[in-house]
Image (spheres, helix red, strand yellow):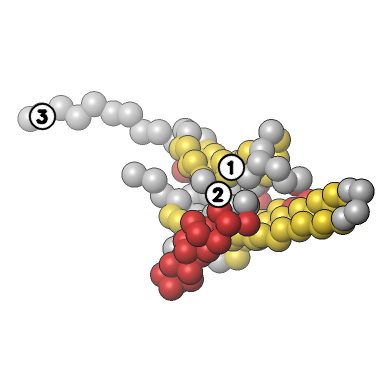
Amino acid sequence: MTLIKWQHRNPLSDMVSNIFDNDLGDFFGKRFSDPAANIIENTDSFELDIAAPGMIKDDFKINLENNILTISAELEDEKRQEGKNYSRKEFYYGSFSRAFTLPKTIDLEKIKADYENGILKIALPKKDEARVEIKKEIRIS
């Protein structure tokens, strides 16, 4: 059972976003929607990986408030092509925001983030008391 919960947004907003991503996004040749996330639980930490290729670390904002970790980003892409008798400029803007409710076992002071090869990796260390694994054989009497 995963203890990190994804915060779902407004259903109407998602419906509009899905329509734009699937129809108009294809029309304009670009798609930018909520990136995929992987959550891995280890003995002493959680790892949260967000797939966000084509960005740089300065594009991201990571905020923590009331045990809710919010990851957002903005992407601007401009292309300019000039030819013999014409000039064409294409640009794109997109953004996303994902929120995760963290369990109380996370040591909030030790959270770290790194962005490499298109993956935003967030390390969420557990508090020392949450790391203890109790293994005990219980005998049947």
Residue furthest front in the image: 85
Residue in the picture at 39% in, 46% down: 2
Instruction: Look at the picture and state if 92 lies above or below 116.
Output: below
From this view, report whether residue 126 is shown above or below residue 134. Answer: below
Q: Where on the picture, by quarter, is residue 121?
A: top right
Three-letter code for the amino acid on which mark 3 is drawn: Ile
**Direction right: furthest residue:** 84
Label 3, secondary structure: give it.
Answer: loop
Indicate which disc, 3 or 1, sits on the residue closer to the N terminus. 1
- Identify which residue, 87 or 100, lies in the foreground: 87
User: In the rendered view, does 7 fall on the left or right side of 73?
Assistant: left
Q: Given contact means CB atoms under 8 Å apart, are the residues at marks 3 and 1 in contact?
A: no
Q: Which comes before the other along the chain, label 3 or label 2?
A: 2
Identify the residue at horizontal 66%, vertical 60% (top origin): 94
Compute the Cα span from label 1 to label 2. 6 Å
Which amino acid is tagged 1?
Ala
Assess disc 2: are there few (<14), some (14-19) or many (≥20) residues with their C-alpha within 10 Å of its C-alpha. Answer: few
Q: Which of 70 and 11 is in front in this view?
A: 11
Quadrant in which the N terminus appears: top left
Mark 1 in CB contact with mark 2 (< 8 angstroms): yes
Please name the amino acid that badge 2 sits on: Pro
**Circle 1 residue:** 51
Residue density around tag 1, few if under 14, some if 14–19, many if 20 or more, within 10 Å: some
Relative side of 105 to 88, left or right: left
Q: In this view, does 130 lie above or below 70?
A: above
In the rendering, at what x and y percent does residue 9 appear?
A: 47, 67
Are there few (<14), some (14-19), or many (20+) residues within 10 Å of tag 3?
few
Measured as percent of width and height from the top left, residue 53 is found at 66, 41
Q: Which residue bears the numbered disc 3?
A: 140
Q: What residue is rendered at 66% in x and 38% in y?
A: 118
Location of residue 37 in the rendering, given as x and y in whole percent from the top left corner: 51, 45
Which mark is drawn over residue 35? 2
